[in-house]
Image (cartoon, rainbow, N blue to C red):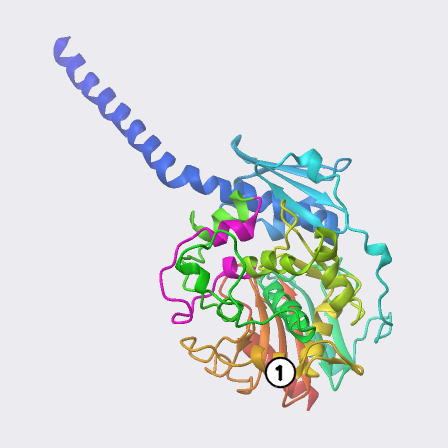
Amino acid sequence: MLLYLAPMKKTVSIIFSLIILLGIVFYLFVYPKLEIVSGFNAKILCSCHFMTGLDQERIENEDTGFSLLWLASNEIDEKKKRVATSVLGLHKKVAVYREGKGCALINQTDPNEIQKESLPLDEIQYSEEIWSDEQVKGDSHFQKVLQTAFDSTSEKNLLTRAVLVIKDGELIGEAYANGIDQNTPLLGWSMTKSITSILAGILVKKGELNIDNSMPVESWEDERSEITWKHALNMSTGLKWEEDYGAVSPATKMLYSSDDMGMSAASWPLDYEPGTYWEYSSGTTNIIARELQTFFDTQDAYQLFPYRELFSKVGARTFRIETDASGHFVGSSYGYASARDWAKLGLLMLNEGNWYGEQIIDTSWVDFCREPVADSDGKYGGHFWLNRGNTFTHYSSEAYWMSGYQGQQVAIHPKKNIVIVRLGITNTRGEFDFDGFTRRVMEGLE
């Protein structure tokens, strides 16, 4: 009997040790990531439901139905306009919708106080719409070209939601996925960074912002005080950063653990001397978006600024840039607009900052946006991506674009006088083939 019990005790001991080891592994490597899962789900589900108008099933299948995100349990409160998410009851996150401001993920702030906020956008007077209200399909051949951006009936890899082409200022073709149309606001992710740059350009034109001045971040009383607006707009602040969304990183801590994203990003120390090292950083853009408030007397004036000075002037009625729980724009990531309204910003840049006679940003600012940053291998300018490094074969070297996660792009082709927009949620089998689609569009135009 004793001989029998000894192996049993050893087996139990081994099993117990394995359980402890698995618990340690879970706590150290899995548990911290659950905040990313619940934070992403709560925020995206809130925005896609209350802003884009998609139902929960579609959002969970398409927008959050990949990687570990399916582990989350989501609850939508239609009355309070809130979304609560957790993973196995852990890391509960709440996102709330506010009229005119979009959704914000809540961490330390009282959601009841946040939800009292709204932005009075009814007072905004928009310019006349430049295109017909009816969908423009173009001829049958060109429509077939546009349809190549979408999945066939047997595949669900691309999940394109909208494509659109402008030639010589005219909308010559557009196509949409089921349930999406020319008025549906869609998430542009990091294309929002380019909007942040345009807003800075407006302040430069007004003579209020000098990009060679140091940024007025109160906590930068050390060597970070040497960081200028130009450093930030060129992604060369030198601040420590890691643009990694699959792990606990400065980027995920900013988006899913902080109520003031710009302050979170600004808290990191320097890794390099400002102006000497290029590194793509969503944190840098949120610092810019936060510090733009210093040019306004009130937070309302700051929050209305994009609508009064940009979106209203180009007739982009569907645009919303969401604010975080502190009231600052999430200028790195959370811009929503219809494909047509995203295209209008591309057309503005194509026309050197001029909108039918009104110079919204100076031509010199457009030049700044497409001037390659040192150390970026010719692929990045003032918050716009460039083709100087020949990223795409069928884009000319002068082409530049807004770019966002999951295959968002507003491509500007000056030589051809063309703007091409693609919006969607490609998650599998690589990225959306912008080069191939552009080649087909160019051939279709010929």
Residue drawn at x 84%, y 76% is: 130
Bounds of the magenta segment: 259-285
Q: How many marks?
A: 1
Image x and y of residue 343, in percent: 71, 73
Residue corresponding to mark 1: 364
Residue occupying the far left of the picture: 3
Q: Is residue 373 left or right of residue 273?
A: right
Quarter of the image for residue 42 reads top right
Image x and y of residue 254, in percent: 51, 49
Residue drawn at x 74%, y 87% is: 168
Up-down: is 33 above or below 275?
Answer: above
Up-down: is 129 above or below 269?
Answer: below
**Predominant SS of the magenta segment:** loop
At numbered mark 1, what does the secondary structure look like: helix, strand or loop? helix
Viewer-side residue, 245 vs 68: 245
Residue occupying the far top of the picture: 1
Quadrant occupied by the N terminus? top left
Viewer-side residue, 326 vs 55: 326
Kind of residue at disc 1: Ser
Residue drawn at x 74%, y 39% is: 81
**Would residue 199 be counted in the magenta stretch?**
no
Up-down: is 283 above or below 391?
Answer: above
